[in-house]
């Protein structure tokens, strides 16, 4: 693999007990499966890039609240990701100013490399999730779904 992008942020763990409910739709089934897995791994073997996100709740948020794949163009996602990654990496290098529990590792994401649509889509949505969940702002844009 040429590059691996890791985002490891484990800020809480929630266990819930529910009675068994009948699944009425395919979307509900996807949501339930997403809740079971807190790790999102996206790889593009052709391009040799991979992103691994370990974040409780992100996978279910992605399935239930994020815009569907194809909603944004790849160029839009790449432009936003560059802004978010630059600010993220800036905060990682300044643990005295920013919570080092939130900004643990730098992200190796470079301009001019085609990471593919899926990697850009998941990374972009992680940044939106992160900003909304932890009340952070990584750029000039107000994070919204």
Image (cartoon, helix red, strand yellow):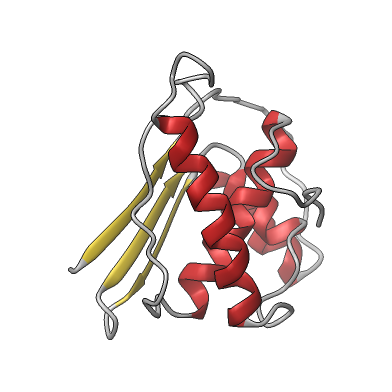
Question: Which residue is at a point 81% across and 48% down the rendered structure image?
Answer: 142
Say which quadrant the C terminus sits in: bottom right
Q: Locate residue 25 relative to residue 93 in the image: left or right.
A: right
Q: Quadrant of residue 25?
A: bottom right
Q: Locate residue 7 relative to residue 64 in the image: left or right.
A: left
In this rendering, the count of numbered labels is 0
Say which quadrant the N terminus sits in: bottom left
Q: Residue furthest left?
A: 1
Residue 140 spot, x, y in % from top left: 74, 49
Image height of 138 relative to 110, above or below: above
Residue 111 spot, x, y in % from top left: 42, 69
Q: Nearer the viewer, residue 74 or 14?
A: 74
Q: Nearer the viewer, residue 41 or 31?
A: 41
Q: Locate residue 101 relative to residue 75 in the image: left or right.
A: left
Q: Residue furthest bottom?
A: 46
Q: Nearer the viewer, residue 94 or 68?
A: 94
Image height of 101 relative to 124, above or below: above
Residue 13 spot, x, y in % from top left: 54, 24
Q: Residue furthest top?
A: 96
Q: Quadrant of residue 83?
A: bottom right
Question: Which residue is at a point 30% across and 70% down the rendered structure image?
Answer: 49
Q: Nearer the viewer, residue 93 or 57?
A: 93
Residue 131 spot, x, y in % from top left: 69, 40
Question: Which residue is at a point 40% across and 80% down the rendered structure image?
Answer: 114
Question: Which residue is at a point 36% across and 76% down the rendered structure image?
Answer: 113
């Amino acid at each position: 693999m040429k590059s691996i992008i890791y985002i490891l942020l484990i800020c809480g763990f929630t266990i819930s007990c529910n009675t068994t409910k009948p699944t009425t739709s395919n979307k509900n089934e996807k949501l339930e499966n997403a809740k079971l897995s807190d790790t999102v791994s996206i790889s593009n073997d052709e391009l040799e890039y991979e992103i691994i996100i370990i974040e409780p709740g992100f996978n279910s948020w992605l399935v239930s609240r994020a815009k569907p794949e194809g909603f944004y163009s790849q160029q839009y996602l790449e432009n936003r990701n560059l802004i978010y990654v630059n600010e993220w990496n800036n905060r990682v290098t300044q643990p005295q100013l920013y919570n080092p529990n939130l900004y643990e590792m730098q992200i190796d994401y470079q301009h001019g490399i085609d990471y593919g649509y899926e990697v850009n889509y998941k990374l972009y949505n992680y940044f939106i999730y992160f900003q909304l969940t932890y009340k952070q702002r990584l750029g000039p844009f107000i994070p919204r779904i």
